[in-house]
Image (tube, helix red, strand yellow):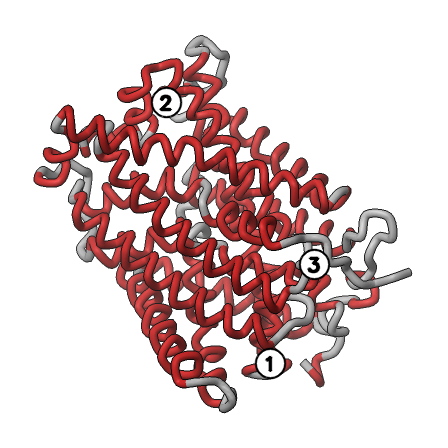
């Protein structure tokens, strides 16, 4: 049996991977969260989007330099291993497999289900729901939970059975998701200027239950979820044609598209509804105000498809995590997880592990973040904290890159890595200030999972 993955993705697919994974649910529901955190201060929200985008771009550019030099199985793990050492590379891989990818994928499956039900209940207000949509049925109802699990299994099956089809699905959904974003950016701006809504939103605030004590920091932290995902594209560097050339191009081009799209969309939404409406009802109200109930709801369907594209991209990276460890002879039972199906060219055992852990993280997300059933200790936001953790784990990689890579020019070796260091450290600081005690509970859970990762590693001596 050939245990190597084929190079099946070109530059366009890689760009779509970067854009498609990052642009998805975050821009739709984090825009509302940022308005809440700032008390409806639109200019402050724009500053938060700019800071988050700048941090993403400097990190992205720095890691694109690493992508030109290091290439093995999984980009981020490769970079950690080459710069800091095999032990750190393993821990980065285990974190990706046990926390980062599955936690993010579980949240995106729920968001996809949520927006699907928003489309259905808006098109048919009499659609039977155990909990009516007006009372949060699209968020915590059993229909939403069942659809979440269905999407989770569907994305797993799509990637496990046909990775090429998963790549085409990623490309298609990336193109589709740009339609509502582009329309809102252009039409919303024009509509807002003509109606005066845009000008009003920039000078007035809104009534919210509570404003964060550090609104800018809390808002930047919220943008982390919306901007996160570009690093996932590096997980398929062994499957990208001419990876050392095409992966850095995909990261840079994709990153620029993302920042421009987010800023234009956020401003466009401000033209479609008042800050108060956006906080109370979300971006959907802006779509319906501008395009009418019918077209506005059709755009909700595009949003649901957009979220599914992001979910697919996350699952694509998630299913390969254990394989990336096993290919190095590390992790639990590497002989099992290194196997690649000769017909699908997919590491199916690694994919099964991903599905099980993703389901476990969804159970936690539902109990602690959605239903509120779990209200005791160890309650934290599993949609944001794993992302901030990865910014923290970038720090040793960036420091070692500057220390070791003496053949790089000053810009590549020092300027961009230092900016990436500052940006990553700022994200960590913003998270601590925003989540406070939640960070403590998360770090305890993180430590336990990482210790488990150490003991299940069959190759601990060389890890």
Res 156 quadrant in image:
top right
Residue 245: percent from left, percent from top: 59, 66
Cβ atoms under marks 1 and 2 closer than 8 Å = no
Q: Which residue is mark 1?
A: 82
Residue 126 is labelled as none
Q: Residues within 10 Å of mark 3 (few under 14, many from 20)?
A: some
Q: Which residue is mark 2?
A: 135
At horizontal 37% and vertical 22% (from top left) the residue drawn is 135
- Is disc 2 placed on a helix, strand or loop? helix
Q: Residue furthest right?
A: 1
How far apart marks 1 and 2 lie (CA) works out to: 51 Å
Which tag is nearer the camera, tag 1 or tag 2?
A: 1
Between disc 3 and disc 1, whose residue precedes?
1
Q: Is residue 180 left or right of residue 268?
A: right
The quarter in which the N terminus is drawn is bottom right
Between disc 1 and disc 2, whose residue precedes?
1
Res 281 quadrant in image:
top left
Residue 32: percent from left, percent from top: 29, 39
Q: Is residue 231 visible from the viewing direction of this image?
A: yes
Q: Is residue 440 left or right of residue 90?
A: left
Q: Nearer the viewer, residue 150 or 163?
A: 163
- Is disc 1 placed on a helix, strand or loop? helix
Q: Which residue is mark 3?
A: 239
Which tag is nearer the camera, tag 3 or tag 1?
A: 3
Residue 195: percent from left, percent from top: 14, 24
């Amino acid at each position: 049996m050939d245990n190597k993955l084929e190079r099946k993705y070109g530059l366009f697919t890689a760009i779509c991977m970067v854009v498609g994974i990052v642009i998805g649910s975050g821009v739709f529901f984090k825009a509302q969260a940022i308005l809440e955190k700032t008390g409806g201060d639109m200019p402050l929200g724009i500053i938060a989007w700019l800071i988050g985008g700048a941090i993403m771009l400097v990190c992205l550019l720095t890691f694109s330099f690493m992508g030109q030099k290091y290439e093995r199985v999984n980009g981020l793990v490769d970079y950690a291993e080459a710069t800091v050492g095999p032990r750190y590379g393993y821990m980065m891989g285990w974190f990706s497999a046990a926390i980062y990818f599955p936690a993010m994928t579980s949240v995106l499956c729920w968001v996809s289900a949520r927006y699907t039900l928003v489309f259905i209940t808006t098109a048919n207000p009499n659609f039977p729901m155990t909990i009516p949509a007006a009372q949060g049925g699209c968020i915590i109802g059993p229909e939403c939970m069942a659809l979440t699990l269905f999407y989770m299994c569907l994305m797993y099956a799509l990637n496990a059975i046909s990775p090429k089809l998963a790549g085409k699905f990623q490309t298609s959904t990336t193109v589709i998701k740009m339609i509502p974003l582009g329309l809102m950016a252009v039409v919303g701006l024009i509509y807002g200027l003509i109606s005066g809504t845009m000008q009003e939103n920039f000078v007035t605030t809104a009534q919210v239950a509570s404003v964060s004590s550090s609104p800018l920091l809390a808002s930047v932290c919220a943008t982390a979820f919306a901007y996160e995902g570009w690093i996932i594209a590096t997980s398929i560097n062994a499957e990208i044609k001419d990876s050392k050339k095409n992966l850095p191009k995909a990261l840079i081009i994709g990153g620029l598209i993302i920042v421009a799209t987010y800023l234009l969309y956020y401003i466009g939404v401000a033209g479609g509804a008042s800050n108060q409406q956006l906080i109370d009802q979300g971006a959907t109200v802006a779509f319906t105000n501008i395009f009418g109930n019918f077209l506005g709801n059709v755009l909700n369907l595009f949003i649901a498809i957009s979220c599914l594209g992001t979910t697919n991209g996350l699952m694509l990276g998630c299913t390969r995590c254990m394989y990336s460890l096993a290919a190095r002879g590390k992790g639990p039972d590497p002989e099992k997880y290194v196997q690649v199906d000769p017909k699908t060219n997919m590491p199916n055992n690694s994919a099964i592990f991903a599905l099980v852990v993703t389901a476990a993280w969804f159970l936690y997300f539902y109990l602690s973040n959605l239903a509120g059933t779990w209200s005791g200790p160890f309650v934290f936001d599993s949609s944001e904290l794993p992302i901030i953790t990865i910014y923290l784990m970038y720090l040793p990689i960036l420091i070692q890159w500057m220390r070791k890579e003496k053949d790089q020019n000053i810009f590549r070796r020092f300027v961009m890595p230092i900016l990436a260091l500052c940006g990553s450290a700022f994200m960590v600081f913003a998270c601590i200030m925003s989540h406070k005690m939640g960070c403590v509970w998360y770090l305890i859970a993180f430590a336990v999972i990482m210790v488990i990762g150490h003991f299940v590693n069959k190759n601990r001596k060389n890890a």
